[in-house]
Amino acid sequence: MKKTINYGLLMLVMLFTMASNIFADNKYGLKDNIQDGVILHCFDWTLADIQEEIPNIAKAGFTAVQTSPVHERAGKGSVWYDVYRPYDFKIGNGLGTEADLKALCAKAHEYGVKVIVDVVANHTDHPNVAARLKDESLYHERFGVGNWNDRHQVTFGMIGMWDLDTNNPTVQAIISQYIQDLKACGVDGIRWDAIKHIGLPSEGDSFMKNVVDQTMYNYGEILDGTGGNDNILFPEYQTYMSITDNGYGNGFANSFAGGSINESVGNFNQRKAKTEKLVYWGESHDTYANDGGESKNKSQNVIDRAYAVVAGNNGATALYFSRPAQKAKNDIRFGDKGSVHFKDAEVAQVNHMHNVCAGEPNYYVKGNGVCAQVRKSGAIIVLGSGSDRDVTVANGAGDGKWLKSGTYKDMVGGGAFTVNASTISGHVGESGIAVIYNAGPIVLTPEVVFNPADGTAFSDESLTVTATPLNAVSAWIQVNDGAKQTFTAAKQFTVGADVAYGKNVTITWGATDKDGKTESGSVTYKKVKAYVPELGKADEISCFLETSNAAAAVYVWNDKVSPVIEHAGKWNDAINKKLPLVGKSVSGKNVFKWTYDGTETSAPTQIIFLDGNGNKITADVEFVNHGYYVDGTYSNTVTKVHEDEIVDPEYVYFDNASNWENVYCYFYNGKTSSTAWPGVKMTYDASASHNGKTGWYKAMIPTAYLNAKFFINDGTPGTAINGANASAEKVVNEGAVVAPTPNPNPESTPTPTPKPEPEPTPAPEPEPTPTPEPEPTPAPTPNPQSLDAQYQTNPNGAGVKKTITVDGDISDWDESMIIAQGAANDDPRVYMDASMHENPVDLYALYGCYDDNNLYLMWEMTNVQDVVAPEADFPLSNGVLFKNYNMPFFIGINTNNASTRIGNHCKTTAGGTLWDSGITCESPVNKVVVFSTNNTNGPFIYGGSSAGLNALEEVAYKETGVVVKYGMGILSKTIKGVKECYGKSQNRLVGDMTKGTSTYVDFNTLGHKSSQYDFHYEISIPLAKLGVTAADVASKGLGVMLVATFGTSGMDCLPYDTSMSDNADQSYSRDPSTTNEKEDDDNITVPFAYIGKSL
């Protein structure tokens, strides 16, 4: 206790008196207890090399450094795994001597760093062992482990080497003496290799009690599990040491490699292991150095992101692995110094935050492609993919009990983060990792924080910079030799327009705090001429790779066909064929391009990126045509085409002789279709003229479907007519129209008022019409769901043109603007026997209108709990969604623009779903607007391409111009729905709204307090951000789909789709009393509601 008090007082004194250093002296805030800090694994380094780096290891915030085994007798330069075949348990091998170990420990302790030595006590290299270890009675019987779930085999069987009988007194004495020899050199801790292969006292083995020195720090390697009952054995192992949880960190590494965010659910602590006795990692020597090592082909940045998340936990320590220079198992050599990347800010600052926040609980949050570990004194924010992005994440539980409100400096990227009780907002820089923390009662230095950070390169004509005063009441900046500009709050300005490429922009700054203390400094930005990726031709099959490697190759294939098509040649040919270097990125990395030069028309589905030596940069990743990959991770899709190769689009024209109200064109190449049935909506082109007729319907042919068949239809079953023999023909380049052939058998359909035809223009000579082979009509998707009459889409038309003041007051809306009508009490809770204790997510009506500048939407949400289940009071007393919840709303927008349509059923280009929602869509979508129920996250606007939805927003929340307000009360005077709930016990069955048997009541007549429990949202979205004008809305219409969520999935939508309740009577995996709809996948098939023009 005395030591703790003095140390705390010393910290306070030093923190107050050392303004330039936020850490107590041991200088860097390293922890007394290794478990409270983090560990650097200097894999295969010599002891001398580690000793030389100790000052940097301490400065990077590592409380401990771990060596490879130091027992006899692997020599320097031998393959790395030789040392895991012990010859004898005496100090001294290719890493160094006993004297070297003592010198390392002394140097480490000088800087407050502890030393851990890896010890292999389970087996030896018998018969290649010292004389005292040759006695066969020191070993278990000789058999290999055949069943890894048989605990006897795991603890007695051989794993390639003779298994020591660790209950043998002689064995225990030899290894115990070795541990004491290490301790005498100054070693502070032991990493026990293969500890799960050594039995426990409950299994009749006394090794743990007799050999493991409890005055030292101990942790043991357990991979995947014990091979027995983990719920019993994990706690027993933890009686003697901490243990590794490999699944937790490996899971994050895998998810970041795929560009997604993983759940922060520890693996072993779900099996009774205590978090405060666990060791996490982003990777280890087992995942890197072995054959097939799962992490060796992941980029260092991916591993850094995984490490950042796992090191953000409280209780568990984390190990950072120094990668060797080589990847191949037999090329990694004992005694070779590895990477010193641990010194970089994205690693070091994670460590410092871990140390500053030791003992504080952590709260993991994720969403919108970003996650964060939030503590009381700091936070680590990590992007799932990409970099240089503005983000907003929840401040822990959002209850004001986590990170203190204020402005923080990102210790990695240098930008500013703003924190309030509910959110953390700021810019994550190039590494994809941001770290903020408050070290406590320190002297705060006035400064100016710049975003983007110092040293950023840019390639545009100019760069927009934000300067934010931190701990200052006033500040100034001076750009190059320009005039000083003073400011007191965040200031945004543009630099570089007058600077030539290759030159720097220097911004000098000064800041003054409330006591008159001043500080000054400067930042520099470099204007570089970076390569702008472009396509040679719009229809080429190609991709780009940005990497720091000097050379690159690819192996590319299509695994969806038989036999498999290899687009870049067989494996051996592909890995030896280097890609052309096409330029340098803004960050100075090399950019390579692969272009398919064969004749196969199908695009690849998978790709592996390799370096110039044939080593994998990635495992198998999804191939995105025209995709731009950074270090093997998909970033975006290139759309720019070299100006000399831009090809005029080709179209299908249709005369619509039967005057269909809606006309669609479905493209089909025999294997795939360009969009879901009924296909692309054709637009009327009044200027198209041919054979005396002016005015044709047209649809642009997707590049990959230029030689496909097409089917004209009006969107309803039975109307499809084959483009080969109907009134439609493809148009050649330059816009020349091929003479259409009359439709011999026009479908019998309702005939709308025909469009007036202008005066005919002279017709060109008709060109001969080719007659392709007939193609069978593809099966259309099912009819829209047969919902009860209560559910309606566009019941009063397509909204109106009117300007709305978005202020939370809905008096300027009226029922003529309803574009989708739902029902009350149809949220998924009502289909479970015991889930009425949760808040309802119950959409009732969606309203829409527009003016010259904005799209306006308003929706009503009901909570009729006071009538249907008042005994479950929480949904009434807990308040409405906008007060207590941070869950996303998704608004899908169809602008009727085929060129910007999002393909892949609105899945992300990586194959997932936006914000991991599980929501996909069959109707056309061009934009998705997202914001949270309490409006603290977003609004964001997402777009995409035919490859799918971009996982990163195209318009950040600060730039959308979207306005969201909410308030109590709704317009609807009647609130209709089915009264029953509590599932089968009250005959509430899934799908009841489609059977026409439900009895609807008006809850207002049953005593429902609408003004107290019902509420609304209203929103304005700039038309310009959607890529449309008011004229477009009036002539083409604008489709809208609103989805409300709970958990990670959709719970209700307008227009209503039965996917919102198809699994409502199934249990949620985390709480069986509640509905599976909180986590299931929802594919929305109903048509959107329309505004401006009914379609």
Image (tube, rainbow, N blue to C red):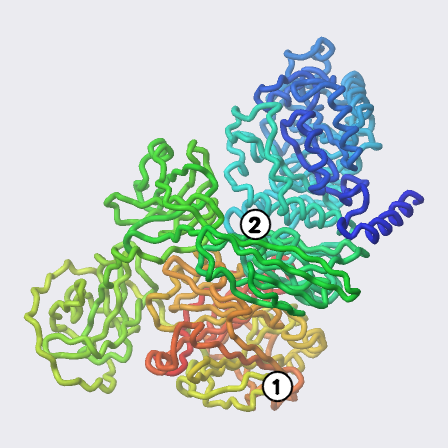
Q: Is residue 650 left or right of residue 353?
A: left
Could you tell me which secondary element the residue under label 1 belongs to? loop
Point out the image quarter for the N terminus: top right
Q: Residues within 10 Å of mark 2 (few under 14, many from 20)?
A: many
Q: Residue 541: x, y in percent?
A: 31, 49
Q: Position of residue 404 (x, y in %)?
A: 74, 63
Q: Amino acid at mark 2?
A: Ser
Q: Quadrant of residue 1004?
A: bottom right
Please tell me which residue is depicted at 72% across the width and 31% down the height of the picture: 191
Q: How many marks?
A: 2
Q: Residue at 22% across / 80% down in the picture? A: 659
> In front: 678, or 81?
81
Residue at the far top: name it. Answer: 131
Question: 607 above or below 775?
Answer: above
Residue 241 visible to the viewer: yes
The residue that label 2 is drawn on is 431
Determine the residue located farthest toward the left in the rendered image. Answer: 765
Residue 3's place in the image compared with 641, above or below, is above
Q: Is residue 800 above or below residue 825?
A: below
Q: Nearer the viewer, residue 1009 or 762?
A: 762
Q: Quadrant of residue 770?
A: bottom left
Left or right of 603? Residue 25 is right
Mark 1 is surrounded, within 10 Å at the Cα level, by few (under 14), some (14 to 19) or many (20 or more) other residues, namely many
Report the residue marked by disc 1: 969
Q: Can residue 979 be seen here?
A: no
Q: Could you say whether the residue bearing mark 2 is in a helix, strand or loop?
A: loop
Q: Position of residue 762 (x, y in %)?
A: 8, 78
Q: Earlier in the sequence, mark 1 or mark 2?
A: 2
**CA distance separating discs 1 and 2:** 46 Å
Q: Between tags 1 and 2, which lies in front?
A: 2
